[in-house]
Image: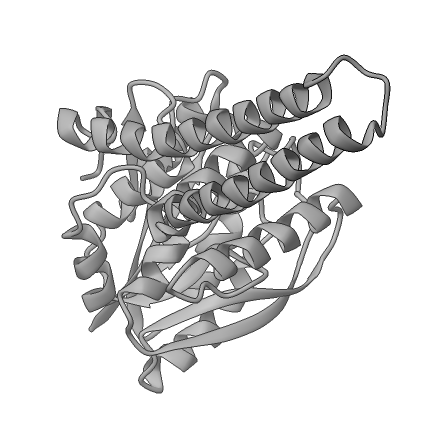
């Protein structure tokens, strides 16, 4: 009999984790031709999330738990869950019930038709601010302009993937994974699954602006070296601008266009412009160097404090 695994990262979700479990249990029990397992990854929660999960796991041996020693981040939690899965098909879903578990059987049918990755594509996003919708749109637009691999728009980590895809992702050695990009990069047969994303069932989002910017940075740096090439273009543009400033300064001096101290305008423009270019260039280069530094340390992506039913 085939098996379906569900990976659920959780962080301070005591208000919703039980509801999530009940919904998933009902959905998986209705898929009668498959065995199932649910792998909850507690990403260093400080509330009663882990306590609730331990109670659930004691009642249901199909529920498996990984608990991190501290908060390592959503992508690390999903990565840890993928490494523990044993199913032929693997679903990644968040615990906030914005991505409805009852859609899993429909995604499973697409997998049975021979597709390797079925990713959730949001045709409507309920309960999200205009600012978040706008920034998400701009993020994917920018990422696809910079990246050599097309990453589908209006998607998250909600998807169903084949065992061979999971094994391929698990064998990638890099840290700072941007999983939705990697699932596109590996290149297996992929199809979208459109759905309406709900509001959170309870609690607050665990992805504030700071974490969203970190995720955006991971996505761009992991899948594009074009920012480094842009620096070269900025350098050429800067040389062109400096020639214009030089011509303007010479004409101003000989034609007496203004009464400013000679050289003041050209000096200030040149200093501020080139200082901005240099600092921006150093910032972009430092981001890439910091990733090289992280990889060279070869530290684990996460540390597991406790395993239950594994």
Say how the picture is coloured: one colour
Using residue 246 as the reference point, say whether residue 93 is left or right of it: left
Above-or-below relation of 204 to 260: below
Q: Nearer the viewer, residue 210 or 114?
A: 210
Using residue 53 as the reference point, say whether residue 126 is left or right of it: right
Q: Residue sitting at 19 percent across and 56 percent down? A: 86
Residue 57, located in which quarter of the rendered image?
top left
User: In which quadrant of the rendered image does the N terminus lie?
Assistant: bottom left
Number of numbered discs overlaid on the protein picture: 0
Could you tell me residue 43's position as x and y percent?
38, 28
Which residue extends farthest top? 261
Q: Nearer the viewer, residue 58 or 182?
A: 182
Above-or-below relation of 259 to 83: above
Q: Residue sitting at 32 percent across and 35 percent down? A: 288
Q: Nearer the viewer, residue 46 or 298?
A: 298
Could you tell me residue 206's position as x and y percent?
56, 31
Q: Nearer the viewer, residue 107 or 177?
A: 177
Could you tell me residue 111's position as x and y percent?
36, 78
**Residue 292 is at least partly visible in this image:** yes
**Residue 90 is at least partly visible in this image:** no
Above-or-below relation of 91 to 72: below
Residue 231, located in which quarter of the rendered image?
top left
Which residue extends farthest front? 254
Could you tell me residue 78's position as x and y percent?
34, 44
Q: Residue sitting at 21 percent across and 38 percent down? A: 309
Above-or-below relation of 230 to 107: above
User: In which quadrant of the rendered image does the C terminus lie?
Assistant: top left
């Amino acid at each position: 009999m085939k098996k379906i695994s569900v990976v659920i990262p959780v962080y301070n979700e005591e208000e919703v984790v039980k509801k999530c479990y009940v919904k998933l249990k009902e959905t998986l029990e209705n898929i009668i031709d498959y065995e199932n397992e649910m792998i909850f990854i507690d990403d260093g929660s400080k509330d009663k999330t882990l306590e609730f999960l331990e109670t659930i796991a004691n009642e249901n041996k199909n529920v498996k738990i990984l608990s991190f020693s501290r908060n390592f981040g959503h992508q690390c939690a999903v990565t840890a869950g993928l490494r523990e899965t044993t199913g032929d098909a693997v679903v990644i879903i968040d615990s906030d019930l914005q991505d409805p578990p009852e859609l899993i059987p429909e995604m499973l049918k697409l997998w049975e038709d021979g597709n390797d990755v079925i990713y959730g594509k949001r045709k409507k996003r309920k309960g999200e601010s205009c600012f978040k919708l706008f920034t998400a749109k701009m993020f994917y637009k920018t990422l696809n302009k910079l990246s050599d691999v097309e990453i589908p728009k209006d998607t998250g980590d909600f998807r169903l993937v084949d065992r061979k895809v999971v094994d391929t992702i698990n064998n990638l050695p890099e840290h700072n994974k941007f999983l939705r990009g990697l699932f596109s990069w590996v290149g297996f047969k992929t199809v979208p699954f459109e759905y309406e994303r709900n509001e959170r069932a309870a609690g607050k989002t665990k992805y504030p602006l700071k974490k969203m910017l970190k995720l955006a940075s991971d996505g761009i740096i992991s899948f594009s070296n074009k920012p480094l090439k842009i620096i070269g273009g900025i350098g050429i543009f800067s040389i062109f601008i400096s020639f214009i400033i030089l011509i303007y300064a010479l004409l101003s001096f000989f034609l007496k266009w203004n009464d400013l101290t000679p050289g003041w305008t050209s000096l200030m423009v040149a200093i501020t412009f080139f200082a901005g270019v240099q600092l921006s260039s150093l910032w972009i280069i430092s981001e890439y160097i910091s990733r090289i530094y992280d990889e060279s340390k070869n530290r684990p992506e996460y540390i597991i404090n406790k395993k239950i039913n594994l």
